[in-house]
Amino acid sequence: LDTVARLNLLPSTFEEIARSLANASSLALVFSEDFAADAQGVSKVEAIANLAMLTARIGQPHSGIYPLYRHINAQGAMDMGMTPGSYPGHIGVSELKSNDRFSKVWSGNLPESVGLDYRTVIETAHQSKIKGLYLMGENPLATEPEREKIQEALKQVEFLVVQDMFLTQSGELADVVLPSTGFVEQEGTLTNTERRIQKLRAALPAPGRALPDWRILADLLNQFDPETSYGDAQSVYQEIMALVPHYQGLTYERLEEGGMLASADLKKPLEFATG
């Protein structure tokens, strides 16, 4: 309560809030992406996770932690390892040696060092220290601050690839532009902030020579490793089920009607990335 007093919050008010949280039949903890973007972001997210566990709200109906990301499939992307310090299933690079699931599916050795985050990529590119950069579905010249700095950084990259639906400002600086389809033109899955995995179906044919994102990546992979190939989006998802624990058993067929929540089995609890 001394800490509460220093924050100009009356102890009686704090106690009332604590009782409300403890006695509520359900508790949803919602926070924005900006809330976790400052220097104290990790500590704040960890505090929210601790509160959810302390009040036993993980895995309970109408309860849990709901980060509001800017992009619709941000949760799914993180589940697939699209963060600098983790692989699919939120396996940290430091945990790589104790997890052999990747070596069973993929050939070759995986990096055991943490990758670069967004800000570091821009800073490093600005110093002409990045030879190749692949932008997929992102146009930082239109969405991020310090656009002049970002533009100069992209110009310093020796080989820039942009994969997107349109020729964006970033694409105009690219050495290669790969035309991709929109979400209504491709099949796959997406995972929302509820961690509900939903099946995505193509409603329109792809225009011109545009290809789904998964197909572009699969074709590139096949050039590096001819023995590896993916026939369709479902084969990609089958690999996801093999590599990501809380997706296991959630087959394409089970996703047909409204999707399914990841990790319904509490023996496989959700893991939260705070970095």
Image (cartoon, rainbow, N blue to C red):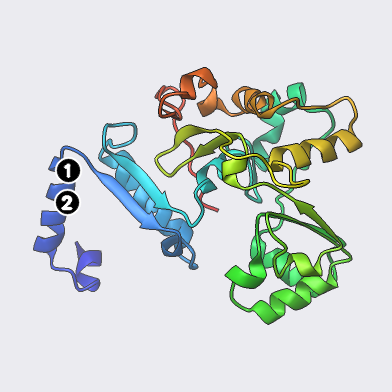
Instruction: Please indicate whether residue 257 sits to the left or right of residue 14 in the image.
Output: right
Query: Image check: 228 left or right of 274?
Result: right
In percent of width and height, residue 228 lies at 83, 27
Residue at 70% from the left image edge and 65% from the top image edge? 168
Q: Is residue 103 above or below residue 69?
A: above
Contact flag, marks 2 and 1 (Cβ < 8 Å) = yes
Residue picked out by circle 1: 22
| Location of residue 123 by image quarter | bottom right
Horizontal side of residue 163 vs 40, given as left or right: right
The amino acid beneath tag 1 is: Ala
The residue located at (70%, 46%) in the rendering is: 207
Q: Is residue 204 above or below residue 155?
A: above
How crowded is the residue under tag 1: few (<14 C-alpha within 10 Å), some, or many (20+)?
some
From this viewpoint, is residue 141 visible?
A: yes
Tell me how far mark 2 sits from mark 1, CA to CA.
Answer: 6 Å
Q: Determine whether 259 is above or below 138 in the image.
A: above
* Secondary element type, mark 1: helix
Q: With 69 as the anchor, is 64 left or right in this view?
A: left
Q: Quadrant of the N terminus?
A: bottom left
User: Where residue 209 appears, x then y in whole percent?
Assistant: 78, 46
Crowd band around label 2 with a 10 angstrom C-alpha radius: few (<14), some (14–19), many (20+): few
Q: Nearer the viewer, residue 268 or 252?
A: 252
Seen from this angle, which residue lies furthest bottom? 148
Q: Residue at x 88, y 24 (%)?
A: 227
Q: Position of residue 171 (x, y in %)?
A: 75, 64
The mark found on residue 222 in the picture is none
Residue labelled with disc 2: 18
Image-quadrant location for residue 172: bottom right
Q: Is residue 49 visible?
A: no
Determine whether the residue tagged by mark 2 lies in a helix, strand or loop: helix
Above or below 125: residue 255:
above
